[in-house]
Image (cartoon, rainbow, N blue to C red):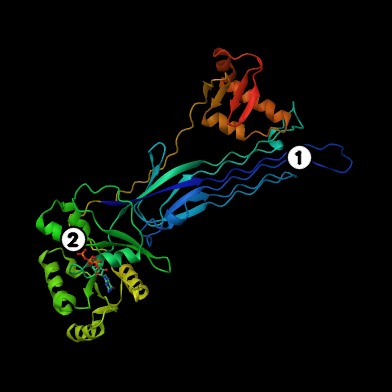
Amino acid sequence: MFVDQVKIYVKGGDGGNGMVAFRREKYVPKGGPAGGDGGNGADVIFEVEEGLRTLMDFRYQRHFKATRGEHGMSKGQHGRNSQPMVIKVPPGTVVTDEQTKEVIADLTEHGQQAVIAKGGRGGRGNTRFASPANPAPQIAENGEPGQERDIVLELKLLADVGLVGFPSVGKSTLLSVVSAARPKIAEYHFTTIVPNLGMVETEDNRSFVMADLPGLIEGAHQGVGLGHQFLRHIERTRVIVHVIDMSGMEGRDPFEDYQTINAELKEYNLRLTERPQIVVANKMDMPGAEENLKAFKEKIEDDVEIFAISAVTRKGLRDLLFAIVNKVETTPDFPMEEEEDLSTHRVLYKFEKEDAGFDITRESDGKFVLSGDKIEKLFKMTDFSRDESVRRFSRQLRGMGVDEELRKRGAEDGDIIKLMEYEFEFID
Ligand SMILES: Nc1nc2c(ncn2[C@@H]2O[C@H](COP(=O)(O)OP(=O)(O)OP(=O)(O)O)[C@@H](O)[C@H]2O)c(=O)[nH]1
């Protein structure tokens, strides 16, 4: 199979920060705590849109950051939660975590959704830290950071459109001038022929996959290592674009060429003749092409659509692409017999478990380095401008056993401890 691949970065929105505030009431010198919670940050969600058939859009935008939650406010008002960021993907998109190689989601059905990066929880305002012992807490949490990850999207490409025609009629030229991108083909162990495949995008942002078939069909005919699986792939082509050299060079007759190719398609018994066919009269920039086209039109059945173009000068390409994409969109799928079951409704979506805690390493200059998801998250959620928050952070570290572990590793009063880009002193 041809597999298109793109690597992108996604980040859920950070939670809004909690607020430290107190009630101000007339005649009351100091009211109770009134700082609201921050709102939750937005999730990054993928949703299947059946109209999409390539990962082309991700070539232009590779960074997706969802919005953060609103910060908590005074008078006990909570920040608003952010609306999820919904990104449309084509059916068949498999999403993998780049680092862990874990499959995050396998998106098959129209409308199916999966959370790809979770937004952070809003930080708690000081209202929530009030207790009988501490009725006026000077402490609030920062929002939890949104989940961020590099992910790989993979899509098995089916050729929507197959190019056929005699050698040298201009199929490769056409494919190369209309392709916005060549898919990064992950594997094609089944063939010795490198398939000529391009992703085409129309001006109105619709896209389809076009493949040069004849080389492949010839190869299959001669038995050069094309597997059954690959032939089936070709068979699924929805629309055939039949390219004809209208310059009639080398003494060939365009109409005879047209008939010969159609007869061959039938002979290979690939059911390709059942597909709608668009005829492309190419090389219209050459002398004599106009007359040849006229003669061709007189011989061909009336209902065949013909597009006169020049792949070299690019004349007529725009209309041709619109006609092709319209045809692709209105042609139903051609279900094959013994269809492999694509309808396994797997929705995998799991998040990696938070790891137990932290790691301690040592730099050459003797500094201790703390790392780990949980400890870094706690750090980001701490408002270091407030003593009470800082004290809470120390308590949290102690609770996790960080102090004890540092001591075991030989940390003494005054040693430098690094966490992300910050440094602290160890106080035993
Ligand atoms: N004048 C003119 N020449 C063209 C046009 N399109 C293609 N050609 C030329 O025709 C020759 C054959 O073009 P290709 O694109 O290689 O033809 P092909 O159908 O892919 O041929 P195979 O690879 O043999 O199957 C090249 O020299 C092209 O430059 C066109 O619109 N006008």
Is residue 415 visible to us here? yes
Counting labels gives: 2
Label 2 C-beta lies within 8 Å of the nearest ligand 1 atom: yes
Foreground: 142 or 195? 195
Label annotation for residue 21: 1
Dot 1 amino acid type: Ala
Name the element at disc 2.
Answer: helix
Name the element at disc 1.
Answer: loop
Dot 2 amino acid type: Gly
Rendered image quadrant of residue 311: bottom left
Q: CA distance from mark 1 to mark 2?
A: 73 Å
Lateral position of residue 349 relative to residue 273, left or right = right
Foreground: 19 or 304? 304
Residue identified by numbered label 2? 215
Residue at the limit of the structure toward the right, as seen here: 27
Is residue 332 visible to us here? no
- Say whether disc 1 or disc 2 marks the residue closer to the N-terminus: 1
Q: Measuring 12% from the left and 63% from the top, which residue is drawn there?
A: 268
Q: Is residue 1 above or below residue 263?
A: above
Rendered image quadrant of residue 280: bottom left
Q: Quadrant of ligand 1?
A: bottom left
Lateral position of residue 93 relative to residue 412, left or right = left
**Is disc 2 surrounded by few (<14), some (14 to 19) or many (20+) residues within 10 Å?**
some
Q: Measuring 27% from the left and 79% from the top, which residue is drawn there?
A: 286
Residue 247, image x, y percentages: 22, 78
